[in-house]
Image (cartoon, rainbow, N blue to C red):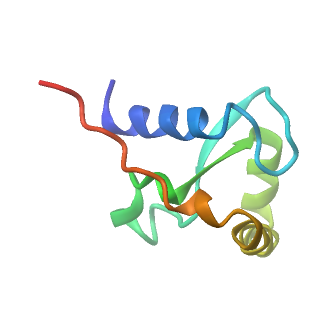
Amino acid sequence: MNASQRWTLAILEMDDYTCQFCGNVNHLDAAHIEPKSRRPDLALDPANGITLCRSCHSYFHANPYAFELFIYSFRQHNTSYFTRAPVAEPVS
């Protein structure tokens, strides 16, 4: 399993395999809060990840302002969510 796959699994596990927007438990993605293209340094940071179902993920990609509003509100109500532990490196 590579680092990206470990990051994805960690995000899904931390969010109890549940979309953090609509509560769906099917067809889930680990989404980056800050896009990798804009913040490659955060690509594997668990605090930069959130579980979204594919419908919500697609919606937010098409409506980035709606995603910013959601994240802003989510941060106000879930302050400990964004202080996650880093994804562990595999043991050699």
Q: Is residue 57 above or below residue 23?
A: below
Residue that appears at 64% across and 67% down: 79
Q: Which image quadrant is residue 24 in?
A: top right
In the image, 89 versus 77, the foreground residue is 77
Position of residue 89 measured from the top left corner of the image (x, y, whole percent): 25, 37
Where, quadrant-wise, is the N terminus in this rendering?
Answer: top left
Please state if 15 lies on the left or on the right of 34 as rendered. Answer: right
In the image, 23 versus 32, the foreground residue is 23
Q: How many marks?
A: 0
Q: Is residue 46 above or below residue 14?
A: below
Position of residue 81 measured from the top left corner of the image (x, y, whole percent): 61, 57
Residue that appears at 76% across and 48% down: 20
In the image, 73 versus 33, the foreground residue is 73
Q: Residue furthest front?
A: 80
In the image, 10 versus 31, the foreground residue is 10
Q: Is residue 26 above or below residue 35?
A: above
Position of residue 16 measured from the top left corner of the image (x, y, whole percent): 67, 33
Residue that appears at 11% across and 24% down: 92
Q: Is residue 58 above or below residue 6?
A: below
